[in-house]
Image: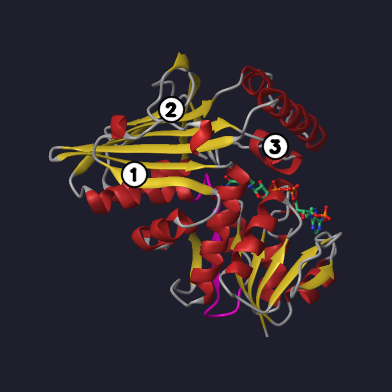
Amino acid sequence: MTAVAVLGASGAVGRVALDLLRSWGVGPLRAGARRPPDADGVEQVAVDARDPAALVRFCADARVVLNCAGPAVDLTDAVARAAAQAGADYVDAAGDDALYAAVAAVPAAVGRVAVVSAGMMPGLSGLLPRLLAVHLPDGERLTGHVGGRDRFTRTAAVDYVSADESFGWPAAALRDGQVVPGALRPCADVTVPTFPEPVTAQPYLGTETARIAAGLGLRQVDWYSVFAGERVLAALRSGTPPDADGKHRAGELLHRAAELDLFGQRPYQHLVVTLDGASGTRTAVVHSTGASDLTGTFAALTARAVLAGTVPAGVWHAAEVLDPVVTFTELAAAPSVLFASVVADVTAVDRYEEDVI
Ligand SMILES: NC(=O)c1ccc[n+]([C@@H]2O[C@H](COP(=O)([O-])OP(=O)(O)OC[C@H]3O[C@@H](n4cnc5c(N)ncnc54)[C@H](OP(=O)(O)O)[C@@H]3O)[C@@H](O)[C@H]2O)c1
């Protein structure tokens, strides 16, 4: 029996996930894509996710199907359906509320597990507040900064520009436990702790953040997406037409803008999340080589947890069901994670230095 069947295994996210699973000795493994990757000791299967029968054959005899193919906005629940039909558990690197609802509506075998939102954001971004709450149980106010200077694959870019209110609300914040639209403004040219350069912080309250905050009883949340380059911001501010062609065109523009912003520089992606309370402050800091790497890492950790039987039957967002302490410790050991820690004083964390890497 195959332990994990990774779809999209030749992509930026899938490659990282497959490599990690192999390095942990998880197996047997199956790797799928329309043009599957060469990987020693891994069964390779050519499969098109738009062919439901071929997808069911790809999922057959697998304990867990890990979906890293995309764009998620195009594939939606196709892979989850096939996994359910084949009797396999399911993990998706993409997520949020619309995908969760679609996967939850798939008639699944009794006792099966499905976990969506198993990427960097949503995913790790939702786990960090839960981790901080372990360190500071009386925490009340949450502040997050997530971003950097990074690539967008065409696939990830299409999903990013397609984000609607099922992902979150631009410029909103949580005040007194309520989502308040327009509560925050973008801040240009600001210094954010541990970021290596001045950045633009764009307020964005994700549905994931709001959900996790409600679960933890947090009343106030300020959350920002952080961009180091001008061209990515300009591409995002030019808007996304609602039709499928328009989303793909906007995704292409974002992909190219990110390449230009990155020209000659090393990609990085940071998450810096602070919880304040009466008894003090704790900040979770994750420095990584990029969002795809971090997403592949978090997706692989989720698939391994499902395989190990630590996730109960049902449909979940990864951040809500994984153990925050165990998962963070495992994440910190991954090759794409340059630094991961929970600190009392974030100003003491050294800035990312090129020569340190
Ligand atoms: N949560 C986060 O923070 C986050 C961050 C980054 C990415 N993501 C998500 O992760 C997913 C993958 O993104 P990526 O950047 O890795 O994309 P990518 O580099 O373009 O890779 C896409 C993979 O899917 C395969 N694929 C595409 N269409 C397929 C089809 N019809 N049938 C079978 N395989 C297909 C591709 O191979 P072939 O072309 O050979 O088929 C490739 O292996 C997306 O859903 C993206 O939104 C999430």
What residue is rendered at 49% in x and 23% in y?
Answer: 202
Q: Name the residue located 52 percent from the left edge and 44 percent from the top edge.
A: 121
Q: Which residue is mark 2?
A: 172
State the quadrant of the N terminus: bottom right
Instruction: Inspect the magenta stretch and tell me whether residue 114 lies in it.
Output: yes
Q: Residue furthest bottom?
A: 1
Within the image, what quadrant is residue 299 found in? bottom right
Q: In the image, is residue 13 above or below residue 352?
A: below
Image position of 253 (left or right of 329): right
Judged from the image, the secondary structure of the residue bearing numbered disc 2 is loop
> Residue 320 appears at what percent x and percent y?
41, 57
- Could you tell me the amino acid type at mark 1? Ala
Residue extent of the magenta highlight: 108-123
The prevailing secondary structure element of the residues shown in magenta is: loop
Residue type, numbered disc 2: Ala
Badge 3 marks a residue whose secondary structure is helix
Q: Nearer the viewer, mark 3 or mark 1?
A: 3
Give the secondary structure at mark 1: helix
Sequence-first disc among 3 and 1: 3
Q: Which residue is mark 3?
A: 157
Instruction: Compare marks 2 and 3 and give the one earlier in the sequence.
Output: 3
Q: Which residue is mark 1?
A: 213
